[in-house]
Image (tube, helix red, strand yellow):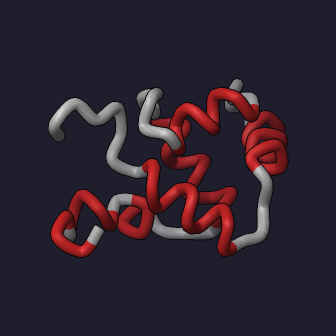
């Protein structure tokens, strides 16, 4: 993926903003689910500077109330991103 750390960074930010959630709020919801991510780590994910584990990915989908395919939209449709 041309040096990318993750393929969800743009969609993650898009859905977070659509849900009117701050990075702090998403991080807090993830921590309640047992995912050790703070606001800085979430920022690094959104800026494509940090990888995302499968467990983090699944929990992000739940927090943002989106499907896995929604967050992977740029992977499945790279021309549209």
* x, y percent for residue 53: 45, 31
| 79 horizontally vs 61: left or right | left
Q: Report the number of discs.
A: 0
47 relative to 41 in the view: left or right: left
Which image quadrant for residue 36? Answer: top right
Q: Which residue occupies 20% across, 70% down?
A: 77
Left or right of 36 on screen, residue 52? left
Quadrant of the image containing the C terminus: bottom left
Quarter of the figure with residue 3: top left
Asked if residue 39 is positioned above or below residue 21 in the image, the reply reads: above
Query: In the rendered view, does 9 fall on the left or right side of 44?
Result: left
The structure residue drawn at horizontal position 66% and vertical position 74%, both measured from the top left corner, is 18
Task: Give the camera-side residue of 53 and 42.
Answer: 42
Q: Residue 62, position in %: x, y?
A: 63, 58
Image coordinates for residue 16, horizontal then vertical, percent: 65, 62
Q: Residue at x 74, y 29 (%)?
A: 38
Please tell me which residue is depicted at 16% across the width and 37% down the height of the picture: 2
């Amino acid at each position: 993926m041309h040096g990318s750390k993750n393929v969800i960074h743009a969609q993650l930010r898009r859905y977070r903003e659509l849900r009117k959630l701050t990075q702090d709020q998403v991080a807090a919801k993830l921590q309640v689910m047992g995912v050790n991510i703070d606001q800085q780590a979430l920022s690094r994910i959104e800026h494509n500077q940090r990888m995302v584990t499968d467990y983090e990915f699944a929990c992000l989908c739940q927090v943002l109330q989106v499907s896995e395919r929604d967050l992977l939209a740029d992977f499945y449709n790279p021309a549209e991103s």
